[in-house]
Image: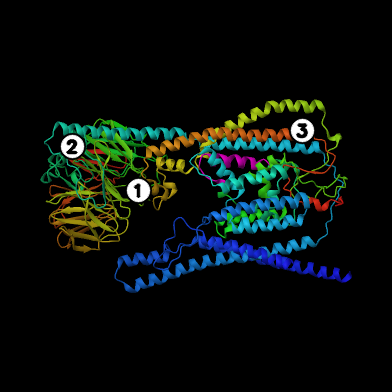
């Protein structure tokens, strides 16, 4: 009997030892697993800083074989480390399981060896008291639950059901409009059986998705190629950097001197309600700009002769518009893209992806949301109209594309996916002699698209980085630039080829402008350079006191370039720098000016100016 | 003899395992030329029909054996080994799916959505434990449910908690049950499965949080026995109700209770009703007044609960993937992702569904949640009301008896009883 007890005692001690050891073992393994997990969570083997830097270096020097090998080796190492960590967690898990099982078995053995010793206390459980306490806490718990639920309900209440029902109605309206449009086309075809239907997108599709795009026939506008840009467009100033966005104004008698302080040659000055970096556009006697902040978006129309604000259109209640505007940086804002007009309607787009068409009296024709552009500074590509299509460069992080929307309905006429990164540049639309092409630039390429079908005509890899400046075009040569990358001249042809490349002076914001002979490039740090358009040779370079965000505009044989302090630098578009004037506005300015006969229109920081004699 | 039995038992387990090899996948995994093997998925492979039948057979056998061990043999040891078996078979071998706890969602979905074809095995897993409970009490919880069994093994150093706290926390399973029914009735999600804390252990696979929650529950379970069963399990809430009407529930003493108080603190689940003496009876006038008050309060609680639930319905509805997708599309928030298009939106765009249809469906689901919110809130209000009522009733008891609702039939108390019957 004595021996049995001794044996039993030894067993308890043994199991106690096992239990303690396995508990410590399990605890250590558990700690290591958690540490390993936290480490593995921070690791992204395919997106390490080291590799990204090396890849960046490789993109600058694509033929560096040694660098390629180094990247591969580091990549392999990162992946190995990742999978080793995973293996460690899995193995640790099994070890932990074994440790815990041993611990539980040991504890069960210890428990089973213990004699049952019931404890009989002198408790006098008062049932009434227990019930009362339980009732109290049940009531408190229930009331708490109700308060918390109601608090969250009212905090997050956003009429979800009603919102969806309204969205259904909005979608239905769009579909009905489509049906009506199709009915119009059928009616037109029945009434005009021998006429060709309005040009449909019959071209090869490639990456292009086309939708039924024929418009309400009465409004269809077609140009012959030789007409582009049309005389009407040239007579007005319908978009950012003028007709087609190429930085050329076709107007005469533009003043070269004025003074913002004394008011000399300042015909009028009007405040702008909401801020925006977009530039003015002009059609007839009307001038249009837009402005926005995180909560408000507006389009303004001014009488360009008097400066009177004719109307303000609020851009709101658009189906699909986000409840909160996306985060943007102060130097881009919510209204960086310049509006455009075809003389019948005005079109504006904002950082939220809201796009709107207004008639010339400010009445909404259509509006839609294109999806919030994923853009860390803010969306900034300006709009253009080509024939009956509104061209939108929608290069953002998730699904870059260029698309043409019907000016009458906003429906997608064509949409072409783009493989590049985010671009802050705007399209230019040029007549190359054979056809009208939309030219776009982003990291890493310049690409051309058929303006009628959206079909990509060619693509040329030549740039990288966060591309801000738009392209310039003259005499069959395209000029593309970006800071930290290069300035490239591409000769147009079936396959464009690089004419020359320069690395000395590069722009990050202002777009260059070209004549047949020269290319003028301004930089945000204040240097302006004139290149030989065909060879890239630098004819002159001049450093100014202030930098430039505004793009240079070619007017007759002069360049108008506005610096950020509001001083207009007017010089000859020639191989030698000849200053023609440096009139000051005395208000900061970031936008590009617009022109009409004898007039310059400048959107400064807070005011809109009309300059003329 | 014991050795032989163990070998036979292991042989049975291994021979059953072979069935997995012949289980056919509906869509065979692709083979890669590079030799890459696909990692195992988080959900178990489909089981063959033979295994499904076997599962039901094993369930019936396990329920019968454990009920016999509890009611007839009153054997704690037997129940413990059945728990081990349950963890091994229903837990690790069956990878915890389908379990009776989760099956209530399948049944609900089948009731509300006629298009859902519920497998017979699932019905069996839902019904059988309920039937056994109606006859023998919660014997399923005692030694067949793998979720309960794994916790029971960890109940190493149980401490008692205040009985009022036990009552308050005991409401949670009913709330969870209501939520589980609402979400499965609307086809939103099987939340009981999604937040099953132990499934990760049974499958050796799961998210980190799954393991953390499971681990924490087991750790808590060392001191507060079976926390999931007592304060969370929605199926346990059903069993609790049914068990109250069980015909042959386990008793602490096999004969007449001698009030020795030896069993008083033996139950780690606080499921022993202690004798209530007459001196603890309330004055009749106070009790009557309270009953009248509760007669008014209970309908009021149902109304308040219903109103609260209806106001909370948007928060409940947003869990639904279609409602969420519609909201994300409408607000263009891309599921908070900034680097790339969220895969849900990519999937929707590549489907042929129109936005109009989606918004319509989302509006309809939101309305369902509005109605569901009323019902769920009303149900929770009723649970609170009935709990208050049960806490106002005076029940005279002279013996120590198991609380038929909360007793998990683990038979721990039996070993403490000195009364023995002559066989």
Q: Are marks 1 and 2 in contact (CB under 8 Å)?
A: no
Q: Is residue A491 left or right of residue A606?
A: left
Q: Secondary structure at mark 2?
A: loop
Q: Is residue A512 above or below residue A156?
A: below
Q: Is residue A472 left or right of residue B140?
A: left
Q: Are marks 1 and 2 on the same chain?
A: yes
Residue A581 forms part of the magenta stretch: no
Relative depth, front residue between A3 and B359: A3
Pointer 2 residue: A220
Q: Residue at x 56, y 63 (%)?
A: B18
Pointer 3 residue: B393
Instruction: Name the mark nearer the viewer: 1 or 2.
Output: 2
Q: Which residues are magenta?
A: B170-191
Q: Secondary structure at mark 1?
A: loop
Q: Residue at x 72, y 26 (%)?
A: B293
Residue B133 in sight: yes
Please tell me whether the stretch drawn in magenta is mainly helix, strand or loop. helix
Pointer 1 residue: A331
Q: Which chain does the numbered disc 1 sit on?
A: A
Q: Are marks 3 and 2 in contact (CB under 8 Å)?
A: no
Q: CA distance from mark 3 to mark 2?
A: 83 Å
Q: Where's residue A139, x and y in %?
A: 69, 35
Instruction: Name the mark nearer the viewer: 1 or 3.
Output: 3
């Amino acid at each position: 009997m004595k021996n049995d007890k001794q044996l039993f005692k030894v067993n308890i001690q043994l199991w106690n030892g096992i239990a303690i050891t396995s508990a410590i073992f399990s605890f250590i393994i558990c700690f290591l697993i958690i540490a390993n997990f936290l480490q593995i969570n921070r690791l992204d083997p395919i997106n390490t800083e080291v590799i990204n830097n090396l890849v960046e270096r490789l993109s600058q020097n694509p033929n560096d074989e040694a660098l390629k090998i180094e990247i591969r080796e580091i990549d392999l190492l990162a992946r190995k480390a990742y999978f080793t960590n995973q293996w460690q967690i899995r193995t640790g898990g099994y070890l932990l399981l074994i440790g815990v099982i041993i611990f539980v078995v040991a504890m069960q053995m210890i428990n089973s060896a213990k004699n049952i010793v019931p404890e009989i206390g002198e408790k006098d459980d008062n049932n009434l008291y227990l019930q009362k306490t339980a009732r109290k806490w049940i009531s408190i718990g229930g009331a708490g639950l109700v308060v918390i639920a109601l608090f969250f309900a009212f905090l997050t209440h956003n009429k979800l059901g009603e919102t969806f029902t309204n969205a259904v109605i909005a979608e239905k309206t769009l579909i009905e409009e489509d049906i009506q449009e199709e009915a119009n086309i059928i009616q037109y075809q029945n009434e005009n059986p021998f006429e060709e239907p309005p040009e449909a997108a019959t071209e090869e599709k490639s990456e292009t998705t086309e939708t039924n795009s024929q418009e309400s026939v009465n409004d269809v506008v077609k140009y012959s190629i030789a007409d582009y840009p049309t005389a009407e467009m040239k007579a007005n100033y319908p978009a950012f950097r003028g007709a087609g966005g190429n930085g050329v104004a076709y107007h005469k008698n533009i003043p070269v001197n004025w003074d913002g302080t004394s008011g000399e040659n300042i015909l009028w000055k009007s405040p702008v309600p909401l801020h925006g970096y977009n530039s003015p556009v002009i059609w007839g006697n009307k001038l249009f700009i837009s402005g926005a902040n995180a909560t408000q978006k507006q389009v303004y129309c001014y009488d360009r002769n008097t400066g009177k604000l004719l109307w303000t259109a609020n851009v709101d209640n658009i189906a699909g518009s986000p409840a909160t505007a996306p985060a943007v940086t102060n130097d881009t804002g919510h209204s960086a893209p310049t509006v455009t007009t075809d003389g019948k309607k005005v079109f504006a787009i904002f950082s939220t992806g809201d796009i709107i068409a207004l008639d010339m009296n400010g009445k909404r024709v259509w509006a839609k949301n294109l999806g919030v552009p994923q853009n860390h500074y803010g969306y900034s590509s300006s709009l253009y109209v080509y024939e009956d299509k509104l061209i939108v460069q929608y290069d953002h992080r998730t699904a870059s594309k260029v698309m043409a929307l019907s000016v009458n309905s906003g429906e997608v006429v064509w949409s072409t996916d783009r493989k590049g990164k985010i671009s802050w540049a705007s399209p230019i639309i040029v007549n190359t002699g054979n056809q009208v092409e939309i030219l776009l630039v982003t990291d890493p390429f310049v690409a051309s698209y058929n303006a009628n079908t959206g079909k990509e005509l060619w693509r040329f890899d030549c740039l990288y980085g966060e591309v801000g400046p738009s392209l310039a075009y003259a005499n069959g040569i395209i000029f593309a630039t970006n800071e930290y990358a290069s300035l490239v001249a591409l000769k147009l042809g079936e396959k464009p080829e690089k004419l020359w490349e320069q690395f000395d002076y590069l722009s990050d914001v202002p777009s260059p402008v070209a004549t047949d002979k020269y290319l003028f490039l301004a930089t945000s740090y204040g240097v302006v350079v004139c290149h030989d358009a065909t060879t890239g040779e630098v004819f002159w370079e001049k450093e100014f006191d202030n930098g430039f965000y505004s793009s240079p505009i070619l007017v007759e044989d002069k360049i108008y370039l506005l610096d950020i302090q509001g001083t207009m630098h007017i010089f000859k578009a020639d191989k030698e720098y000849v200053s023609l004037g440096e009139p000051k506005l005395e208000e900061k300015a970031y936008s590009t000016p617009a022109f009409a006969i004898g007039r310059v229109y400048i959107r400064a920081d807070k005011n809109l100016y009309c300059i003329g004699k | 003899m014991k050795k032989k039995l163990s070998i036979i038992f292991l042989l049975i387990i291994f021979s059953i395992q072979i069935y997995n090899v012949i289980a056919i996948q509906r869509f065979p995994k692709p083979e890669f030329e590079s030799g890459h093997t696909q990692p195992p998925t988080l959900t178990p492979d489909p089981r063959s029909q033979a295994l499904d039948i076997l599962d039901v057979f094993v369930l019936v056998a396990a329920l019968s054996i454990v009920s016999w061990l509890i009611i007839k043999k009153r054997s704690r040891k037997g129940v413990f080994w059945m728990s081990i078996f349950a963890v091994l078979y229903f837990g690790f071998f069956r990878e915890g799916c389908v379990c009776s706890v989760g099956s209530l969602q399948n049944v609900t979905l089948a009731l509300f959505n006629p298009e859902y074809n519920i497998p017979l095995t699932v019905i069996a897993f839902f019904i059988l434990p309920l039937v056994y409970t109606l006859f023998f009490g919660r014997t399923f919880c005692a030694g067949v449910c793998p979720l309960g069994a794994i916790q029971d093994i960890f109940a190493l150093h149980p401490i008692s908690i205040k009985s009022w706290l036990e009552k308050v926390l005991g409401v949670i399973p009913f709330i969870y049950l209501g939520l589980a029914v609402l979400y499965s009735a609307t086809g939103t999600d099987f939340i009981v499965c999604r937040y099953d804390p132990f499934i990760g252990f049974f499958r050796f696979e799961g998210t980190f949080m799954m393991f953390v929650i499971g681990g924490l529950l087991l750790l808590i379970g060392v001191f507060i026995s079976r926390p999931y069963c007592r304060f969370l399990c929605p199926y346990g809430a059903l069993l609790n109700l049914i068990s109250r009407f069980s015909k042959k529930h386990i008793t602490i003493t096999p004969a007449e209770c001698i009030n020795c108080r030896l069993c008083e603190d033996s139950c780690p689940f606080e499921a022993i009703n202690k004798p209530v003496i007459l001196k603890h009876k309330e004055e009749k006038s106070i009790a009557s007044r309270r009953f009248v008050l509760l007669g008014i309060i209970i309908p009021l609680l149902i109304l308040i609960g219903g109103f609260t639930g209806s106001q909370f319905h948007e928060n409940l509805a947003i869990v639904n993937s279609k409602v969420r997708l519609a909201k994300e599309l409408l607000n263009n928030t891309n599921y908070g992702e900034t680097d790339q298009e969220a895969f849900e939106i990519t999937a929707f765009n590549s489907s042929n569904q129109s936005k109009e249809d989606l918004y319509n469906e989302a509006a309809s689901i939101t309305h369902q949640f509005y109605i569901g919110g009323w019902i769920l809130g009303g149900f929770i209000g009723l649970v609170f009301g009935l709990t208050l009522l049960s806490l106002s009733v005076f029940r005279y008891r002279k013996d120590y008896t198991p609380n038929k609702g909360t007793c998990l039939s683990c038979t721990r108390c039996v070993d403490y009883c000195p009364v023995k019957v002559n066989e």
